[in-house]
Image: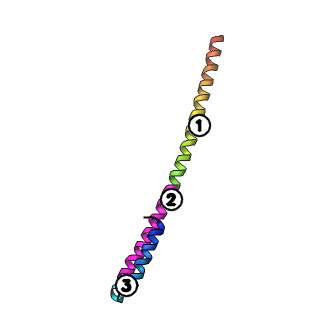
Amino acid sequence: MNEKEFQTKLAELMGEISTLPATERQKLQQLADETRQRHERLRQTVSSLQESLDYLRLSIKYLVFDLEATRRENGYLRRMLEEAHGAD
């Protein structure tokens, strides 16, 4: 169920609840409101998690780039040392 379907179903439920007698309506409206709030918190949590994953992916890309650059520099310095050692 996507966000639009959820909101539609919740609105339908709230409409049905509004037709109930006042004694039953209050309790069900409270439950529906709590459901809406929980859904919003869940949506925010998922969004925050997605942002964290995006940041992690970017960080990993930078780390891999840095590792590759370090390996290249290491190879270059080894060759320089070998050449310097061979010239002696």
| Residue 83 figure quarter | top right
Q: Quick one: label 3, few (<14), some, or many (20+) residues within 10 Å? A: some
Q: Quick one: label 2, few (<14), some, or many (20+) residues within 10 Å? A: few
Quadrant of the frame with the N terminus: bottom left
Q: Position of residue 38 (x, y in %)?
A: 42, 69
Contact check, label 1 and label 3, Cβ < 8 Å? no
The residue that label 3 is drawn on is 26
Q: CA distance from mark 2 to mark 3?
A: 33 Å
Q: Position of residue 24 (x, y in %)?
A: 33, 85
> Residue 76 vs residue 29: left or right?
right
The residue under the point 50% across, 51% down is 53
> Residue 52 vs residue 21: left or right?
right
| SS assignment at label 3 | helix
Compare marks 1 and 3 and give the one earlier in the sequence.
3
Q: Disc 2 residue type? A: Ser
Q: Position of residue 84 (x, y in %)?
A: 65, 15
In this rendering, the label closer to the viewer, 1 or 3: 3
Q: Which residues are magenta?
A: 25-50
| SS assignment at label 2 | helix
The residue that label 1 is drawn on is 66
The residue that label 2 is drawn on is 48
| Residue 82 figure quarter | top right
The residue under the point 44% across, 69% down is 6
Q: CA distance from mark 1 to mark 2?
A: 27 Å
Q: CA distance from mark 1 to mark 3?
A: 60 Å
Quadrant of the frame with the C terminus: top right
Q: Quick one: label 1, few (<14), some, or many (20+) residues within 10 Å? A: few
The residue under the point 63% across, 11% down is 86
Q: Disc 3 residue type? A: Gln
